[in-house]
Image (tube, rainbow, N blue to C red):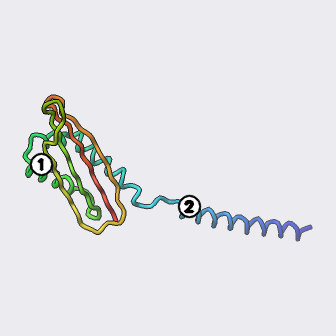
C-alpha cells in the first residue's frame, strides 16, 4: 500500500513540474513583441500635437517655419525610433478644397525593419482650412 502512495506522489510531482514548464514556454511565446507599442506611441504623439494646437498653428506659419516646428517635436521621440511626418493643408477656394501647403519633417537615426502609419485629420473651420497629418514611426 505504501508503494502506491509514493508512486502517486512522485507522478504528481513530475506532472506539476511539466505543467510549470509548459506554462513558462507558452507565456514566453505569447509575450507581445516590443514593436507593438509603436502604434500606441504614434497615436499619443499625434493626439498631443493636436491637443496643444500644433497642427492648426502650422496653417499660419510659412513652410520653413512649419517644417522647423515639426522637426522640433519629432526630435522628442526616443533615440532608437525613426519618425517621418507629412502634413498636407487644404484651403477652401472657388467651391473646392485645394492643396495650400505640404510640410514634411523627418527624424531618421536607424535603418528600420518595422513601421507603423498613423493619420490624423484636423480643421480650422473659421479660416476654411483642413489638414491631414501622417506619421510614420519605424523601429529596428
| Placement of the C terminus among the 4 image quadrants | bottom left
Q: Is residue 140 above or below residue 92?
A: below
Q: Earlier in the sequence, mark 1 or mark 2?
A: 2
**Which quarter shows the N terminus?**
bottom right
Please say if 93 is above or below 79.
Answer: above
Instruction: Name the residue at 17% across, 42% down.
Output: 89
Binning the other alpha carbons within 10 Å of mark 1 as few (below 14), some (14 to 19) or many (20 upward) gives many
Whether tag 1 and tag 2 are in contact, CB under 8 A, the answer is: no
Q: Looking at the rendering, which quadrant does residue 60 occupy?
A: top left
Write the residue at 18% across / 53% down: 104
Q: Nearer the viewer, residue 13 or 47?
A: 47
Estimate the x, y position of residue 77 in percent, counting from the top left. Answer: 25, 57
In this picture, is 41 found above or below 111?
Answer: above
Residue found 35% across the figure and 66% down from its top: 113
On the image, the x and y values in percent for residue 97 come to 18, 36
Give the x, y percent position of residue 26: 59, 62
User: Left or right: where does residue 42 sit relative to residue 70?
Assistant: right
Classify residue 94 as left or right of residue 18.
left
Tag shown at residue 66: 1
The relative height of residue 123 versus residue 103 in the rendered view (above or below) is above
Q: Which of 133 and 9 lies nearest the eye of the viewer?
A: 133
The one of 87 and 35 positioned closer to us in this rendering: 87
Secondary structure state at the residue bearing disc 1: helix
- SS at circle 2: helix
Which residue is tagged 2? 27
Residue shown at 26% from the left, 40% from the top: 121
Q: Tell whether 13 sits left or right of 135.
A: right
Amino acid at each position: 500500500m505504501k508503494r502506491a502512495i509514493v508512486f502517486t506522489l512522485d507522478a504528481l510531482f513530475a506532472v506539476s513540474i511539466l505543467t510549470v514548464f509548459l506554462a513558462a514556454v507558452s507565456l514566453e511565446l505569447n509575450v507581445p513583441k516590443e514593436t507593438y507599442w509603436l502604434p500606441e506611441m504614434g497615436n499619443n504623439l499625434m493626439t498631443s500635437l493636436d491637443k496643444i494646437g500644433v497642427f492648426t498653428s502650422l496653417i499660419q506659419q510659412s513652410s520653413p517655419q512649419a517644417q522647423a516646428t515639426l522637426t522640433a517635436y519629432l526630435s522628442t521621440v526616443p533615440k532608437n525610433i525613426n519618425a517621418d511626418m507629412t502634413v498636407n493643408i487644404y484651403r477652401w477656394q472657388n467651391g473646392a478644397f485645394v492643396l495650400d501647403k505640404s510640410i514634411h519633417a523627418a527624424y531618421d537615426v536607424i535603418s528600420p525593419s518595422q513601421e507603423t502609419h498613423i493619420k490624423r485629420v484636423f480643421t480650422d473651420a473659421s479660416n476654411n482650412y483642413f489638414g491631414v497629418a501622417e506619421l510614420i514611426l519605424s523601429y529596428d
